[in-house]
Structures are given as structure tokens and as C-alpha cells.
Amino acid sequence: MKLKRVLGLVLAGALAMSLAACGGSSSTETTAAATTAAAAETEAAKEEATEAPAADTGSEINKRIAYVVGNLGDKSFNDSGEEGMNRLREAGWDCRTIEVGDTSQTDSWEDMILDVIDDGYHYIVASSTYTDLLLKLAEEYPENQFVVFDDSRDESEIPENVAFIFYAQNEGSYMVGQMAAGMTESGVVAVNVGMDNPVISDFVTGFVNGVQDYDPNVKVVKATVGSWSDPAKMKELCLSQARDTGADVFYQVAGGSGTGLFEACVETGTWAIGVDSDQYQYYKDSENPELADVILTSMLKQVGDSFVAFFEDVEAGEPVWGKLNHLGLKENSVGYVDNDFFREHVPQEIRDKMAEAQEKILSGEVTVKSYYDFANESEYQAMLSSVAP
């Protein structure tokens, strides 16, 4: 199936599309509720969309997608998904992006999604933040189809009108962990996250595994902001880690909070690692280009590419529903940015070891540790304690 084919694109092209998504597009419809344009649709058009066949086996499928995010503008995970939606729009899909806000607005999330279902949007696409809500709605609205991305579930537990997309973020994090271990001068590196959940813990697990495989003497410190949108607290955490532990390479897995990590690295003269998208390029073309000059690379999670490939499969009638679609290095769905800045500042020896490690993962010689391999949370915490400075 196409979803299992190579999803990676030429990096330059992917960057151009990502920047277009970050900057917005006149064809992009972003709203926190039903928009005026949607409300103006005729009842007949709504009826036609609602009654389109749920089974994607013919050419006359419903091509209306609602993409649910907290907020755009994170220059990372959410924006990568929006880049994919923009490409689907160009391919003729009707995509509406719904910004539902942060966890303080949890009580309104369901109503916002119900609004777009009422407006005839057949596919509801949302991340692991909304898994429980989407599974509830999938049961209540069996004629609709729901895509949960960045989450994992046993296929026996996935309803027939739901598809899960899971990325091997541990594999991509392993690669940047290798680089962090090679670049540190103090022997201490940091991984700081926005919130703690199994997916984020998988990032951390892969990163620690990569660091330790490169050099078991390098220590790893980890902190949690408690928010995806608090760069001030992230900056404070990083400054404290640099001062108290000597950490000199920082990996952020924190959405909008990640800006604070880059600010701290500028202030302390340390290195940073971005996440999900090429954050060097994002910031280089932003109002704060100085932040780019500390970002050695970014761990890539090709969310936008996966959306495009998934809905190409839907259009082709591929059997994607009721399944866990697992994407990793082999499918080019995760990786790291290899740009001029990376090649200028990361020595050839370290880059060679990263490339060697990647080949070993692809060949099966190396299996990257995953949070999902731990028997319980205590085992994960024990791992973190074992590498703490």
C-alpha cells in the first residue's frame, strides 16, 4: 500500500511546503467553530456530503477532512500536519482546520468537532491528545471515519471506522541522541518535553538509547514544562540545567514551548536540537533568525507527508481502516535534518557514526529501545535515573 512506501521527499521541497504552511495560505480555512462560509452552504450540499459512502472502495468518495489541532503556529508538529492539509487541498480535497485551543478549553472540544460533522465533514483527523474523544465519537457516528495519528493501539481494539497512524519517534530520536553525545563537551545533555505521555516518553527513550550507545559515559537530564505553550518556563528550565548540571546540548519535544529552549541556548552559547520539522529553517526565515543559529538539526516526524500518503490510500480503496499504520525510518517517516548548517557545525566523524547507526537500524542489526517495551512506568523512570548526572 502507498502508506508503506517511502514517504520522504527531497528536503528542499519539503521545506518550501512547510514554510508555506507556517506562513498561511489564502486557501486555508482555519476556525475554532463553524465558519461563515461553511454555514452558507446549501442544505443539499450538506446532504450530499453526509450521504457519501463510508466505505472508500469507489471513485465517488467523500473528500471532506476536518483537521483538529490545539493551535497552529508551533513551527513544529501542528504546522507539519497543516502543510499536509495544504497539499491535500491542492489535490482537490476539502480540508477544514479547527483550532480548538489548549487543555483549558477541553470542555468545548467535542462541540467543535460535532459542528464540523454536522457540516458534512466525513473524516476527522486528530492527534493522540484527542484519542479518547475520537473513539467515543467513532462509536456514536459510525457513518464517519476517524484518523488518530501519533498514537498506538492494539488492532483488536481499533473500530472499523478508525485508523491509527503511529510514528517510530524513538528511531528518529535515537539518531539525534547520537549527535548530542558526540557534540557535548561537558558530558551532559538534556531532553525537555512539553507534557508527559507515552508518545513523548518514546521520544525520550530513543534519545537516551542513542546517547548511551554512542558514549555510555554521557549523562542525560530530563525536565517537563507542563505545557505545550509556555516558552518562558522552558527557558527557565534550560538555564537551570545549564547552570546546575553543565548541560550543553538541548533537545526539545515541546511544541510551542520549544522556543524558550532555543532562547536559552542563544543566551548560554549551547547547542539545540529541534523536533518534528526543520526548525532551523523555520526560525531562519522568522522574525527571530538568531534562534536558528543554535539549532544543529531537528528530529523529523513527517506528519504532513503521512497525511497525504494516507488519503491517497483512502482514495485508492486501500484497507487502512481498523488498523495500526506504523511508520519509521524504513518508510522515511522519521529522521533528522541534514542541511548546510548541520554539515558545517557537526564534525564528519559524528555524521559518519549517525549514518552508520541509521543503516544498522534499517538492516535490523540495531533495535532502538521504545517506551512501549517497558513493563511499566517504573521501569522507564529507572532508566532515566540511571543516566541522570
Image: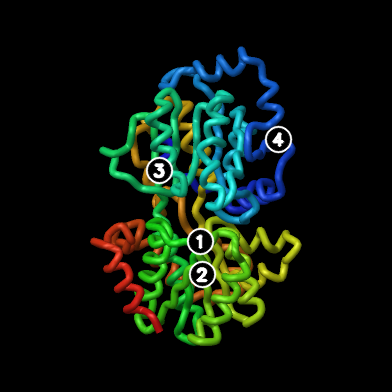
Q: Which disc number belongs to residue 216? A: none
Q: Which residue is mark 1?
A: 299
**Mark 3 crowd level (few <14, some 14–19, many ≥20, 10 Å Cα):** few
Tag 1, which secondary structure?
Answer: strand
Which callout, 1 or 3, points at the residue further toward the start of the chain? 3
Rendering coords of residue 239 (x, y %): 58, 80
Label 2 crowd bin: few (<14), some (14–19), many (20+), radius 10 Å: many
Q: Residue 292, percent across and down?
A: 66, 67
Tell me what residue is drawn at x 53 percent, y 31 percent. 114
Q: Residue 269 at what x, y percent from top left?
A: 63, 81
Residue designated by label 2: 251
Amino acid under disc 4:
Ser
* Contact? badges 2 and 3 (CB < 8 Å): no
Is residue 80 visible from the viewing direction of this image? Answer: no
Q: Mark 1 or mark 4, which is nearer the start of the sequence?
A: 4
Q: On the image, numbered disc 3 is attached to which residue?
A: 132
Q: Where residue 70 sits: x, y (%)? A: 57, 48
For marks 2 and 4 on the same chain, the one whose residue lies earlier in the sequence: 4
Residue 133 placement: quadrant? top left
Contact between labelled residues 1 and 2, with CB atoms less than 8 Å apart: yes
Most foreground residue, 349 or 170: 170
Amino acid at dot 1: Met
- Residue 172 shows in this picture: yes
User: Which label number is shown at residue 27?
Assistant: 4
Closer to viewer: mark 2 or mark 1: 2
Identify which residue, 77 or 20, lies in the foreground. Answer: 77
Instruction: Give the side of residue 56 with respect to residue 377, left or right.
Output: right
Quarter occupied by residue 298 = bottom right
User: Is label 2 in a helix, a strand or a loop?
Assistant: strand
Between label 4 and label 3, give the one nearer the viewer.
3
